[in-house]
Structure formats: C-alpha cells, structure tokens
Image (tube, helix red, strand yellow):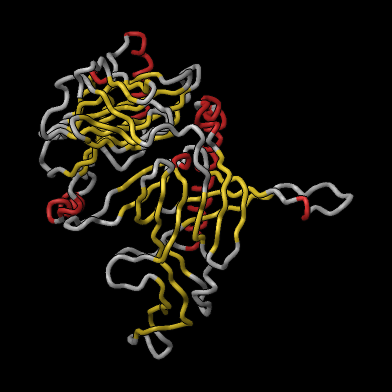
Amino acid sequence: MNKPLAPRYRTWSVRIGTAIAAGACSLTALLGLRGDEPQEAAAIASRAGRVSWSDGTTAEGTITTTPGTILQLVTVAAEGEETGQLRTFTLDRVAEIAFVPFASGSVAPERMVRAFGYTAEGPDKAGPRGEPYPVRELGASVRFIDGEELFGVLRSCVFYLKTVPSADERPAGRLPPRPTTRKLTIKSRLEGKPGSTLDDLSYVTHIRLPAVADAGPSRLPLKLPAEVVRDGDTVTALVQTSLESVPVTSEGSGLSVRGTLGENILVAIHRADGSVDVGWPEPMPADADLRAVIEKAVSLQPDYYDERRLLGVVRDGPSRVLALVSLRRTGRDTNDTLLSMRENSDTRPTARASVWMFRIDETGQRVALVRRGTFVRQKIELDDPTPTVRPLPALWPSVRDKDRITVGQATEESR
C-alpha cells in the first residue's frame, strides 16, 4: 500500500524542485536564448489590448505572454467524434478571446459544491462536510486575425497586462507613477473559497487585441511539386519560427494554408500507409559535428516518449537549430504499463513526427530545447513497428513569395 509522503519530505521535494527550476533559468540566461529571436517575433512580443472581467471592470494596456509560449485549445468534439482536436497557436494570431461558462456532458458549468468525506459522527460515516464553495468551468471562443474562429477549452496559461496611469491619475507636482504589470492566470476550472458565492468568483470574460497591421491574406495557395501528393495523403504544416501548427486545406484543384503572417513554413505529408514524408534538406557534411551534439541532447532529454530518433538537423540562424525527430511511447518501463496498454485502447502507444528547436552557443557545449512542434500524432498497436518518418528534400524549402507559398521545386503544374 502506498503511504503518504511525510511533511518534511514534501518540503524538501519542493526545495529541490525550486533549485532545479532556478538552474534551468540560469542556463537559459547563459545561453542568451532571446538574443537570436527573429525580428518578426520581437516586433509582436507585446500587443496593445483590453481585458474585461465578469464584475464589469476593464483595463487597457500592453498584453504579453512569456516568450516562447504556445497557447493550446482543445476543441469541442464534432458529431460522431469521441474527442476534440488540439489546436496550438501564438498570441500574435489572436484578435479576441471570449470566455463563457461551459462544461461537457450534463453537469452544470456553474455550481455550488461541498467537500465529501468522513464526518465527526464516526470514521465509518461519510458525507458532505464544510461550507459550500463555487465551481465554474469555462470554455473559450478564439477569433483569429484572419477571421477563423474556434471554440473549446483553453488549457491553463498566463498573460501579463502592463498598464500606464493616465494623466488624470498623476498627482500634480509629482513624478508620474510607474507602469504596473498584472499577472492573469487563465484556467478552465475555477474554485472559490468555502462560504463564497459564484458572484464572488470573478473571472476574465474578454481579451481583445487589435489586428496585426501586416497580417497578409487569410489563406495562401500552397504549391507543391507535381505528383508528390497522392490520393489518401494528408498535408500538414508548421510555422518555421514558432513551430505552431497551421491547417492545410484542399480547395478546388489545389491546396491552401492559413495565413502565416509572412513566415515561412515546414511541410509534411502523412501517407495512407502511416508513413510520413517531411520537407527537409540533404544532410551537409559540415554539420556532422552539429548532428552529434543534437543527437546527444535528444537522447538525454527527459520526455514522455521513450523512443526518440534524430533524423536530421538544419541551422535556422546563428544559434538556432531545428531537429527532425521520430517519437514513440513504447510504455516498456513497467509490466503494469504494458498490461494497461493491452487492455485499454485509450492508452495505446502514440507515435509522432515532430520538429524540436534548440538553442546552442558558439562553442556547441550548451544546448537547450526551447520549442516543439508536431506534424502528425497517431495511435498504434503495442506490437506494431514505429511508423516510418522520412526526410524528403523535394519538399524543401517552403518559401512565401508574395501571396503564395512555394514548396521545393514547385512549378506551375504543381497542385
């Protein structure tokens, strides 16, 4: 039987975890990870906007997220589907986020509940105890600057609102007060204190952001080399700088990708047989040492996916390296996990075709994983081989040229 951890052990666990986190932050600072951010990313690191709360208050200022933050939204499952889709995006794409009470199933999204446990009448009598407290579950409606809208559950994230006092708020003859920064922790489930009410449980209802000035077309034609896409294939794409997933759709006789704010993209084709072809350049002999460094970093990276294979590396700036990685969760850590995977289809192993972004210093001795993006996620059977992921130079590079994106050596006859 598992016993609860002693209080002193929990305290030291927290201290050790804090020390590890501090060490990771120090490593990031030593690497100068922010110094090599693309100019486009630096220009949109903050957005002027307005925040509204359920109690009627509003505040205007500069809205930011922690650098490198990727927002995650799980959409509501469509009819006939068991689960929704995970959509990822960055703040620069957002025009507005509206939060509303929402809960799947028959449970009320706003409710008063009481804790359940043993009462003072005896250890064998369990029932409600303590004062009721409010619970509110929230859904999020996200409207993007290109007009696309999604609804689902936004995973926990943090925004920062920096406000500057107006001239009317500055006392005469005194120095103006400094700007203040408010941390906005966004959660899909909120709980109040015992004895409080739903009205006391205030929450953010709207985050409004102006449109980016040079957003470009909402959708761009995607030109691929002729005959590269076959019936039954699915094309996916990642923004090269943020590794954010962008939808690719078929329109008429061609393909199009959602507007990428002027950024280039990475393209992959998920074949009908489960294999994946990823646009990637031919390996350069001069990068052999770099590949060895990244291969070591990939193998040492703690990760849920215990099978990791590095398939290629490419430099994307003085200190940025993109790595193409094939991932699989084998679940071969314990016999219990193996048994669970065989008996429960929901815990079947998962395979991914992903791109990892590393920051590396000039000496190549300090490497840090700073971002991840995934082309394809797929469930497989426990005893099945890992799906093949192949680098395909014919799909490299993908470059935006005016109002279209050209992939590889695409021609006018391309799809």
- How far across and how far down the image is residue 350, in percent? 21, 43
Tell me: 238 left or right of 97.
left
Q: Residue at x 41, y 86 (%)?
A: 119
Q: Residue 394: x, y in percent?
A: 23, 17
Nearer-the-camera pick, 374 or 414:
414
Quarter of the image holding residue 90?
Answer: top left
> Which of the image's four quarters has the N terminus?
bottom left
From this view, report whether residue 180 is shown above or below residue 317.
Answer: below
Please give the count of numbered marks on the rendered protein: 0
Residue farthest to the bottom?
121
Direction top: furthest residue? 285
Is 377 above or below relative to 190?
A: above
In this picture, is 273 found above or below 58? above
User: What residue is shown at x 48% (from left), y 32% (from top)?
Assistant: 214
Name of the residue lying farthest toward the front = 252
Q: What is the x, y in percent for residue 99?
A: 44, 59
Left or right: 59 with respect to 4?
right
